[in-house]
Image (cartoon, grey):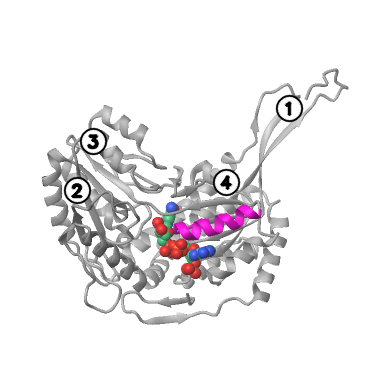
Amino acid sequence: MAIATINPTTGETVKTFEELTAAQIESKLQLAAGTFETYRRTPSADRARAMTRAAEILDAEKQQFGKLMTLEMGKPLQAAVSEAEKCAWVCRYYAENAERHLADQIVETNAKASYVKFQPLGPVLAVMPWNFPFWQVFRFAAPALMAGNVGLLKHASNVPQCALAIEEIFRRAGFPEGAFQTLLIGSDKVESILKDRRVVAATLTGSEPAGASVASIAGKQIKKAVLELGGSDPFIVMPSANLADAITTGVKARTINNGQSCIAAKRFIVAAAIYDQFERGFVDQMKSLVVGDPFEQNTDIGPLATPQIVKDLDEQVQKAVASGARVLTGGKRIDRPGNFYEPTVLVDVDPSTPVSCEEIFGPVAMLFRVNSIDEAIHLANATTFGLGSAAWTNDAGEQQQFIDELEAGSVFINGMVASDPRLPFGGVKHSGYGRELAEFGIREFVNIKTIWIGQSKAAADDTE
Ligand code: NAP
């Protein structure tokens, strides 16, 4: 895939970039390793000052960063500006909390003193996707840098200007040269970089095949990896739910980011008693969404990021229809330049077909009718993914059953799944492993070092 900005609204190639040469990659790896040796010893307060400055830059220039995201991948401008604000939030969160999350933990044992110490690992390679081109990177970089690691970013090939802008933010914020570097490279270069002894770990946010590939290379090299992969999140609505809220939030949860979010609600599982009402309201709201130029203020849904995504999405819809699904609205690409697809609602999707539980990356919702909470949970769990899940009910017993039995990295009751710097984020099953955000995220790329200090006097006790 060429490294280029191709405007998804028009199809126009705006700017192309040369890939780094082998010599340029080598000098960046050298710089990363060299910087780590000094950066790892910087006081946490110094790192926090630079991270706070990064937050200030993001806030001050959020309009400009938002425009860059919208230009490269097509999300509505207001959402892109909010994404820049959220990045500022995660920078501030870790500037304020990293020291506490990584403070020594004293453990009472038979030693004179024993405690757990958290130390940085080294240069970490981050392979990132285009769908939240700033947020995905910052939620890795803010904790990793605050822990004293240095970052190497291989961003998706269609968002090179975002990738370069992020590197520049960290430079201007006062992080040392080499603390965070963007590598403009294709995915075929990831293997050799990950095999390089100076790179100590990797994190990948992206698709299952990309995750499997990076994890297997990391595994062979005995290097730590974190994987944030796809999802087919259920959104369950029970009879006691506030239906109006569930419908409005459900439409938003499906169509946020033009439907291209790993934690978008993808399968709507609705109790039979309220199904018809839910379906009517949901379809009406999907029909009323404004699809168009993401730079226009009243646009709800912009173009999909690439022509390939439109093609894949349309194939999934056609496959579902071929196996018996009905299209209640939408169901085809929009005949205009750019990568536009109609907001779509599918019903009667056969739950035994693969398309019913694979990831659908675009504004296409599937509605399922169920007769009991057990059937809802069974259907929700009938996917290889396990990222997020949402359940709408005002019955305390049902809430607890969802919390206990949904196979997912998160359960949101009466809300939509969203990331928050204060809460861990990640999945189970084929949605990946490891966690980002909160104290769990900052402890992924550290050496959890056990310190045990014995009595100074020659001890009589010779047990281990
Ligand atoms: P993708 O094709 O897997 O690409 C993600 C990144 O991996 C890009 O930088 C890509 O580089 C690189 N890549 C692709 N194949 C690779 C390989 N074999 N070896 C090494 N690197 C490789 O995914 P995408 O289409 O950009 O993003 C959408 C996917 O990301 C969806 O599945 C979505 O659910 C998932 N996602 C997950 C989360 C989460 O937190 N769980 C968040 C957002 C998105 P190139 O661009 O150069 O190909």
Can you tell which quarter of the image residue 345 is in? bottom left
Work out how far the residue at label 3 is from the one at label 1, CA to CA, in angstroms.
50 Å
Residue 124 left/right relative to 6: right
Camera-near label (3 vs 1) is: 3
Question: Earlier along the polypeptide chain: callout 3 or callout 2?
Answer: 2
Question: Earlier along the polypeptide chain: callout 2 or callout 4?
Answer: 2
Q: Which residue is mark 4?
A: 444
In the image, the segment drawn in magenta is 204-221
- Which residue: 47% across, 49% down? 432
Q: Which residue is mark 2?
A: 247
Q: Position of residue 424 (x, y in %)?
A: 46, 43
The disc at residue 393 is 3
Classify mark 2: residues with Cα within 10 Å, few (<14), some (14-19) or many (20+).
many
Q: Assess whether mark 1 and mark 2 are in contact (beta carbons under 8 angstroms).
A: no
Can you tell which quarter of the image residue 118 is in? top right
Question: Earlier along the polypeptide chain: callout 2 or callout 1?
Answer: 1
Work out how far the residue at label 3 is from the one at label 2, CA to CA, in angstroms.
13 Å
Q: Position of residue 224 (x, y in %)?
A: 61, 50
- Secondary structure type for disc 4: loop
- Which residue: 43% across, 50% down? 431
Q: Position of residue 66 (x, y in %)?
A: 39, 66
Q: Amino acid at mark 1?
A: Ala
- Secondary structure type for disc 1: strand
Question: Earlier along the polypeptide chain: callout 3 or callout 1?
Answer: 1
The disc at residue 113 is 1
Q: Amino acid at mark 4?
A: Glu
**Residue 214 part of the magenta segment:** yes
Can you tell which quarter of the image residue 394 is in? top left
Q: Decide: is 256 above or below 428.
A: below
